[in-house]
Image (spheres, rainbow, N blue to C red):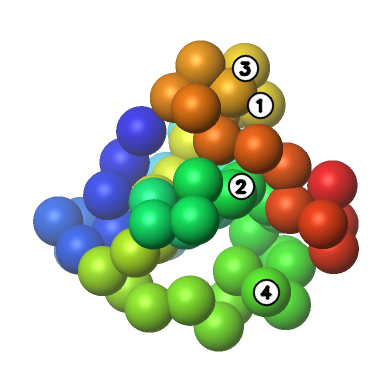
Amino acid sequence: MLFHEFTSDAELKRAIRSKAIVLGGNKQLKIYGTLHCASGKRMKRANRVFFASVHEAIESGFRPCGHCR
């Protein structure tokens, strides 16, 4: 799990381009979804986390987003 608030924008862009992260989540709501989901784009930077896989998100206690699943 990668926390957005502790990651620079350049580092985040590199990770997305290299497919090191493929999902985003809300650490308060414990929800994860695709990086293109409209719900995920609206969340605060302090609440946003990133995952490399669905398995990693589920192991961290997150559930799928209702919009993008």
Cβ atoms under marks 4 and 1 closer than 8 Å: no
Residue projecting furthest to the front: 29
Question: Is residue 44 visible to us here?
Answer: yes
Residue pictured at 84% horizontal, 47% vertical: 69
Q: Which secondary structure, mark 2?
A: strand
- Count the marks: how many? 4
> Is disc 1 surrounded by few (<14), some (14 to 19) or many (20+) residues within 10 Å?
some
Question: Which mark sits nearer the N-terminus, 3 or 2?
Answer: 2
Q: Which residue is mark 1?
A: 54
Q: Which residue is mark 4?
A: 39
Cβ atoms under marks 1 and 3 closer than 8 Å: yes
Residue projecting furthest to the bottom: 42
Residue pictured at 82% horizontal, 57% vertical: 66
Question: Does residue 64 appear left or right of residue 35 in this picture?
Answer: right
Q: Which secondary structure, mark 1?
A: helix
Question: Is residue 16 visible to us here?
Answer: no
On the image, the x and y values in percent for residue 63 come to 65, 37
Alpha carbons under labels 1 and 3: distance apart? 4 Å
